[in-house]
Amino acid sequence: MVKQLTQAGIAAFVLVAMLYAGSVIAHGKVSLEEDPCTRQINENMVHLSTYQPQHDKSAHYCTEIPLAGDTYLVIDLIDAAIRNMPVKVNVYRGSETEGESVLQLPAELHPDGVINGITNLEKGLYSVIVTAEGVPPLKYQYRLRVEMVDYMKIVRASILPVMVLLLLAWLIYKIKPLQRLRKWRTAQRSQD
């Protein structure tokens, strides 16, 4: 019985690991319209990527930044129309109305479609406001979470693995008495 429980536990662990790994890479396999790092107003879209090469040279993030420290913000102006407008970027610790400004990039044209900035982000919530000064102005907002755990995301991601584990435990519970019954019947037949 211990051997079977160990095997079931290993199988469940592998299943959970596969499900978790799939959710981690999901960001890179979605269309631009479904990407959580993309904001769209009418046909104008912008995309935010954040990097922390001092912690991980190859990783990029969107709104969930795992560690505090120097953070590179890269905003891609996807549509050509927005590249012909002056665009400014403001980053606030907290909200735009009540927060402290930690980065201001003045309104400029970006014909290459890329805006870069670097700021030191401490643990907490931040607001990134990208404003294209067109007629009417276009305002894109991002909420950054730095070195914070999103418990709701963890709960949502763990529902399926927990259900699978419960189903496995139930199956083992139901199968074990059947195996004991078969052994008992076999023993009874051999005694007869």
Image: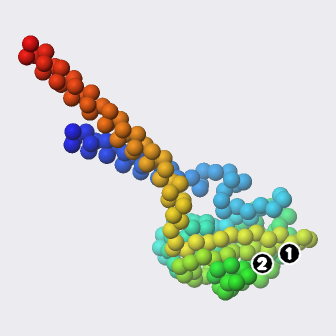
- Residue of label 2: 88
Residue 21 vs residue 8, the one in the foreground: 8
Residue density around tag 1, few if under 14, some if 14–19, many if 20 or more, within 10 Å: some
Q: Amino acid at mark 2?
A: Lys
* Residue 129 shows in this picture: yes
Q: CA distance from mark 1 to mark 2?
A: 8 Å
Up-down relation of residue 33 to residue 75 (above or below): above
Picture coordinates of residue 88, whole percent (x, y): 77, 78
> In the image, what residue occupies the spot 51% across and 73% down?
147
Q: Amino acid at mark 1?
A: Glu
Q: Secondary structure at mark 2?
A: strand
Up-down relation of residue 1 to residue 184 (above or below): below
Q: Quadrant of residue 181?
A: top left
Question: On the rendered image, what quadrant is the N terminus found in?
Answer: top left
Residue 108 vs residue 10, the one in the foreground: 10
For marks 1 and 2, the one nearer the N-term is 2
> In the image, what residue occupies the spot 59% across and 55% down?
28
Q: How many marks?
A: 2
**Seen in the image, is 167 located left or right of residue 64?**
left
Residue 73 vs residue 123, the one in the foreground: 123
Looking at the image, do the residues carrying marks 1 and 2 touch, with CB atoms under 8 Å apart?
Answer: yes
Q: Residue furthest top?
A: 192
Up-down relation of residue 50 to residue 186 (above or below): below
Picture coordinates of residue 18, whole percent (x, y): 44, 48
**Seen in the image, is 60 located left or right of residue 48?**
left
Query: Mark on residue 133?
Result: 1
> In the image, what residue occupies the spot 30% across and 31% down?
175
Residue density around tag 2, few if under 14, some if 14–19, many if 20 or more, within 10 Å: some
Q: Secondary structure at mark 1?
A: loop
Question: On the rendered image, what quadrant is the C terminus found in?
Answer: top left
Picture coordinates of residue 106, whole percent (x, y): 77, 83
* Residue 21 shows in this picture: no
